[in-house]
Image: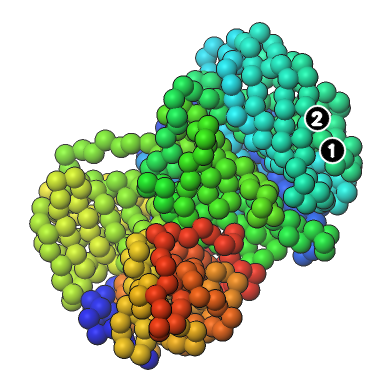
Amino acid sequence: MKKLRTFAFLLPAAAAWQAAAQSWDTSGNGLLNGTYYFRQVVWVVGDDAGDLQEAVSLYGSIQFDGKGNYTISNQSYNDSAKNNTPTNGFSTSGTYTISASGYGSLASPVNSIFNVQDRVYGLVSHGIFIGSSTDNASGYNDMFVAAPLGSPAPTNATFNGTYDMVDMDFTFVGLQPAGGVLYNRQSTFQLHPDGGGSVGSVNLTGYIAASGTKVINQSISSVPYFASGGALNLNFGSKALNATDTSHLIAGTKYLYISPDGNFVFGGDPQYAWDMILGVKQSSGTPNFNGLYYQAGVVVDNSQLANGGVIVETQYGSLNDTSGLLLGHQRFLDVNNGGALDYTYSDAATANSGGTYSDSFNKYFFGAGGAIGVGIGRVDQASFGVTALAQAPSFTAPNSPFIFPTGILNAGSSAPFTASLAPGELVSIYGTNLTNITASDQTLPTTLGGVQVLVNGTASAIYSVAHTSSYDQINAVIPLSTTSSSSIAAIQVTNGSGSSNTVTNYLNMTQPGAFNSFTATPAVQHGADYSMVTPSNPAKVGETLLVYLTGLGTLASSGNANNSTAAYIDGSIQATVSFAGSQSTVGGGYQMNIVVPSGVSNGNHFLDIAGSDAYNSEIAIPVGTSSGAIRTSTRLARPHRGAPRSRPVPKSRRQE
């Protein structure tokens, strides 16, 4: 195999030992406290063809005690298997665990309906919880949203101003989806509530799957609303959409819940549709989309409609926007194509007129200051969907060692903090008072400059520590032994000043991330001469590329990666992987030898890396001939959503 002789992380170091199972950080449980309104919509995929067998909407109030317990009493749910007859008096209880960052999970309220023990994974920020049961074992997709009930409860006067709204809707008739799945639909519209019971006329624009890319417009005059029991009741006219309606985007009664500050609304149909409606209140000035955001949403890929099915994907995660460059992570679930998967991607965000933004798949609307956003799928990608966004909170650092709660990242990809960790992964740990020196050691000791990193109690190999005026950074390796006794990695830093807070994350088998992959020159070399792949020295069809990365997981004694790996150009053309592994006995730095496949045109392309339970679509490389340079761009638009259908099949591993 080809080796990069100067790559420090490939040097061997001492092995680690296995520690005891860990528990999720619960120091953020107080972020959920009091009475909230919530909506959870469940879409049950019927078979491998991708039709929808059943759907459930559960909605109303939920009481969080701030200590990890919740109760739901005498609320309502609607199950399509019960012929559109809502069930009242629904009650249940459960637990939740929220970390300091707001990342965590709660027992799914639908557990008592489906007789399962699943959890909704998600995040809390600005008082709003958004998430999805991505690792359920029952074969369904869902989206969950909750926001506090204001005090006093909302009145007609509470609802006023201009709201940008997005809607994703499945309409069922009895036991069957309307027209199979042909009539899933999405729409955008504005509401102009006057604070007195009217939103006036509503003009909707959207698409219905059966109509392809045809734009559907709908106008409804004189839409009334009234506040009752903490919710807003809006009447959009007729009782419900006809089973095979191809001209209307919304109808009937919708319940909307509103955040205490009035800036966020969400809800849907109580009886005749299984939809998720999201909205944000417009504010003066242009909202700023910048920094770290938490996200959750649902996507319906309609590319299989000709075969009578759709591909439903639900997700939660986070994304970071830096001057128009997006780096995102989603934990997404595609029930019929391999289950739950970590997906890291890069993209470009473009500011539109009117204060909206777009990336390759979504158009985003933001409320006051950009704190809360909602997204709608772009139909040119043949997929519908909605996304909720909440800007990450800020954290106050103490005078003792402190890891930023969102500050543990893949050292190769810089994937946002919700990306799971893998054995052998090199991670960058950011915080304050973690070290007072700058140093590195290629022998990867377990103590460097008086600093240790503990993962589930095991001392990790450390490559470097760095101190700056703004933050400290440690690059350390997740021990290869962190594999089976716990689905959680608990990370803590110790030094001469004491011990830091503990930051938890979930464990994957893999989390591939190429070094420098979020810059213009990722760590990819030509196998023949070890020169870097650049616009003036592009990759060529048929040659072997050497990709230097981290996160391929455990290793055999030969140095080969134990987990399955694959590579794709633009997510669709599979490339041959002739080697994947590491010379190091602790991991940290890995190498993949990848042959550029035939059929790849000259130009910039994504080189995607798939592990057994994670997929990275972030590496941008030029492909061309030896005689000419390829024009470069700082970032490509994503050519696909999610991973290819031939990706390695992951295994679900999240339990609490």
Question: On the picture, is 295 further left or further right than 81?
Answer: left
Looking at the image, is 358 positioned above or below residue 637?
above
Residue 283 x/y as whole percent: 49, 23
- Seen at 44% across and 51% down, the residue is 326
Q: Can residue 202 be seen?
A: yes
Seen from the viewer's position, the closer of residues 80 and 491 is 80
- Seen at 34% across and 68% down, the residue is 521
Question: On the picture, is 139 further left or further right than 418?
Answer: right
Q: Can residue 61 be seen?
A: no
* Element type at mark 2: loop
Looking at the image, is 390 positioned above or below residue 630?
above
- Seen at 67% across and 20% down, the residue is 232
- Seen at 81% across and 41% down, the residue is 171
Question: On the picture, is 573 further left or further right than 482?
Answer: right
User: Marks 2 and 1: in contact by CB < 8 Å?
Assistant: no
* Element type at mark 1: loop
Disc 1 residue crowd, few under 14, some 14–19, many 20+, Cα 10 Å: some
Q: Which mark is residue 225?
A: none
Question: On the picture, is 166 further left or further right than 288?
Answer: right
Residue 370 x/y as whole percent: 45, 33
Disc 2 residue crowd, few under 14, some 14–19, many 20+, Cα 10 Å: some
Seen from the viewer's position, the closer of residues 19 and 255 is 255
Looking at the image, is 133 positioned above or below residue 250?
below
Quadrant position of residue 540 = bottom left
Residue 543 x/y as whole percent: 45, 87
Amino acid marked by disc 1: Ser
Looking at the image, is 29 positioned above or below residue 634?
above
Q: Which mark is residue 247?
A: 1
Q: Which mark is residue 251?
A: 2
Quadrant position of residue 166 = top right
